[in-house]
Image (tube, helix red, strand yellow):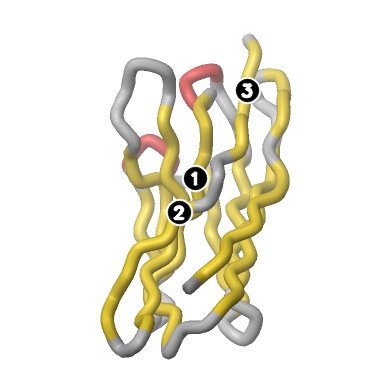
Amino acid sequence: QVQLVESGGGSVQAGGSLRLSCAASGRFNLMKTMGWYRQAPGNQRDLVASVYINGTTGYADSVKGRFAISRDFANNIIDLQMNMLTPEDTAVYYCKVTALVLLRPKDFWGQGTQVTVSS
């Protein structure tokens, strides 16, 4: 199985920056996709940014130009640099990975980390 350790997050004023990190470890054949999702109270959990096994990235429209995701393929770590934060970015952020376990794809979620942006 895969264990995810998230770090970063916290509280910041609007316009500020935060950085999230997620490290994956465990027994798996291949780490495919690694990314961040977020969920605000009363809302569904939505994709923020992902890095695919071929290195391509995807972003939610709401964060394009402000957030940047990077991946350390050797160590299975992703970072999410969040700039120009707004109160609308306030949410619990979850790391999600898709890994091949016993050659079958499985999704794993982190425990979540709170990001609070005050106006």
Compared across the picture, whether 8 is left or right of 52 comes to: right
Q: Nearer the viewer, residue 14 or 26?
A: 26
- Contact, CB < 8 Å: mark 2 with mark 3? no
**Badge nearest the viewer, 3 or 1:** 1
Query: Where does residue 15 sit, x and y in percent of width and height?
Result: 66, 25
Query: Where does residue 36 sit, x and y in percent of width and height?
Result: 46, 51
* Above or below, comparing residue 111 to residue 57 in the picture: above
Looking at numbered disc 1 in the image, what kind of residue is underneath it?
Tyr
| Few, some or many residues within 10 Å of mark 2 (<14, 14–19, 20+) | some
Q: Nearer the viewer, residue 51 or 103?
A: 103
Instruction: In the rendered structure, find residue 50 and report the number of the disc placed on it.
Output: none
Sequence-first tag of 1 and 2: 1
Q: Residue at x 63, y 10 (%)?
A: 119
- Spatial separation of the CA atoms under disc 2 and disc 3: 20 Å
Q: Which residue is mark 2?
A: 109
- Spatial separation of the CA atoms under disc 1 and disc 2: 7 Å
- Contact, CB < 8 Å: mark 1 with mark 2? yes
Say which element carries label 1: strand
Query: Where does residue 97 sit, x and y in percent of width and height?
Result: 43, 64
Sequence-first tag of 3 and 1: 1
Q: Which residue is mark 1?
A: 94
Q: Residue at x 37, y 52 (%)?
A: 59
* Above or below, comparing residue 35 to residue 42 in the picture: below
Q: Nearer the viewer, residue 78 or 110?
A: 110
Say which element carries label 3: strand
| Few, some or many residues within 10 Å of mark 3 (<14, 14–19, 20+) | many
Looking at numbered disc 3 in the image, what kind of residue is underneath it?
Thr
Looking at numbered disc 2 in the image, what kind of residue is underneath it?
Trp
Q: Which residue is mark 3?
A: 116
